[in-house]
Image: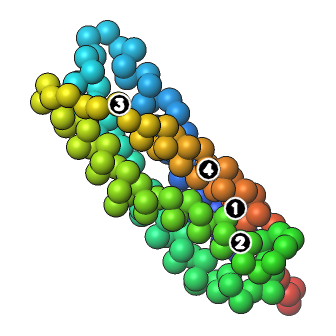
Amino acid sequence: MILRNPIALICTFTWVGFVCAISFLEAWLKFRAPGVTLPIGLGIGRLVFGALNKVELVLAAVIAIDLLRTRLAKSALPLGKGPAMAPWLWIGLPAALLLVQTFWLLPTLDARAEAVIQNGPAPPSQLHFVYVAFEVVKVVALVVFGTRLFGRVATTTAI
């Protein structure tokens, strides 16, 4: 068995690992460390989530390039059962959420964090819950997409 998109598969589960490690573990643990104040924790968070966002963008681009390379949309081997658009939905959804995070959610959260770091007031907001919801949806969609990639094998002919 030869996987058709091993690069996309590796990048998909690497992406899942990064999001789970940073968003679901590091984000709240840093505030439990001794001596980490809210401004320090927010400063660390801005750096870490900025770096995570860049890594996610690179991984998404590599996945897209690998899928386009094998012409997934026109392939005779769909990613599981269902309509032809289903594979693109499972990778398109996290990609779309990533773009919303990149151009709206992270800059807005960054501005709020900077206000707190500079000892300014930050009015109550539900944006962190929106961010977490995006992360959960991204991880679920990426896991479904990655599992479906396991089913994509290239047909080989023995000589």
| Residue at the (81%, 78%) spot, across then down | 83
Percent of width and height locating residue 138: 58, 52
Q: Do the residues labelled 4 and 2 touch (CB within 8 Å)?
A: no
Looking at the rendered structure, the secondary structure element under dot 4 is: helix
Q: Earlier in the sequence, mark 1 or mark 4?
A: 4
Residues packed near mark 4 inside 10 Å, few (<14), some (14 to 19) or many (20 plus) = some
| Residue at the (25%, 35%) spot, across then down | 113
Q: Which of marks 1 and 3 is nearer the N terminus?
A: 3
Q: Which of marks 2 and 1 is nearer the N terminus?
A: 2
User: Where's the C terminus, which quadrant?
Assistant: bottom right
The residue that disc 1 covers is 145
Q: Image quarter for residue 102?
A: bottom left
Tell which tag, 3 or 4, sits nearer the viewer: 3
The residue that disc 4 covers is 137
Q: Are marks 2 and 1 in contact (CB under 8 Å)?
A: yes
Distance in Å between CA atoms under marks 1 and 4 = 12 Å
The residue that disc 2 covers is 87
Q: Do the residues labelled 2 and 3 touch (CB within 8 Å)?
A: no
